[in-house]
Image: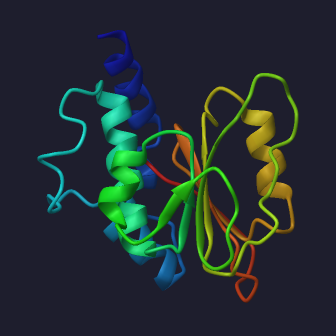
Amino acid sequence: MLQKLKYLLVWMSRANHCRGFGVQSPADYWFVRNVVNEHMPYYAYDTLGTHDEWLVRRLGLLYFRIANWLQPDAIVTDGYEDYFRAGCKRAVIGSEMHNGTVLTRVVTGADGNPLPFPGLMSDRSVMIVEGIDRHCEQWKEIIADARAVITFDLYYCGIVMFDKKRTKQHYKINF
């Protein structure tokens, strides 16, 4: 109950960042509207995480939509495998880096060490950084890093894109 109240307060504080408001890039606007804040049911929603707590399921469904949109060659994660696999059945899921398009999920840590940027990231690769609400300084370091071109702050997690042809941009999104 307390988590839902916190979620409501966070949502209300970010109300002016709803549904793509303030996103000027057409590609980023499309991503926010059709991947991050998509409310229509997908083909696998009924089978995914029906017994998970609400935040785990909410993040898992986001990860499913990102994997479904990106269709990466590899997914590097140590959790949410069912969600990722439902989104992209052909991807190799594990904890090692691969060549090609990679979807990486990392969790910020309390130890304060900087998060490693994967070395073999293509322009289409995406990194999901979980726990940015608890470790803001690490998230700010990621945003400032030159390799992180497009970043989305969703409060509970951040999304980092590495497309070097684009102009560096940071968005705050109400998720």
Residue 139 position, x and y percent, is 74, 43
75 versus 150 height, above or below: above
94 versus 21 height, above or below: above
Kindly identify the residue that appears in the image at 42 percent across and 64 percent down.
67
- Nearer-the-camera pick, 50 or 112: 50
- Nearer-the-camera pick, 7 or 35: 35
Kindly identify the residue that appears in the image at 70 percent across and 84 percent down.
166
Q: In this view, does 63 lie to the left or right of 140?
A: left
Q: Quadrant of residue 29?
A: bottom left
Q: Quadrant of residue 162?
A: bottom right
Kindly identify the residue that appears in the image at 51 percent across and 70 percent down.
23
Q: Quadrant of the N terminus?
A: top left
Q: What kind of colouring is applied to the model shown?
A: rainbow
Q: Can residue 37 be seen in this view?
A: no
Considering every residue shown, the one lying at the far bottom of the view is 165
Kindly identify the residue that appears in the image at 11 percent across and 47 percent down.
46
Q: Quadrant of residue 37?
A: bottom left
Q: In this view, does 156 lie to the left or right of 21?
A: right
Residue 64 position, x and y percent, is 35, 56
25 versus 150 height, above or below: below
Considering every residue shown, the one lying at the far top of the view is 2
Q: In this view, does 25 lie to the left or right of 175?
A: right
Residue 3 position, x and y percent, is 38, 17
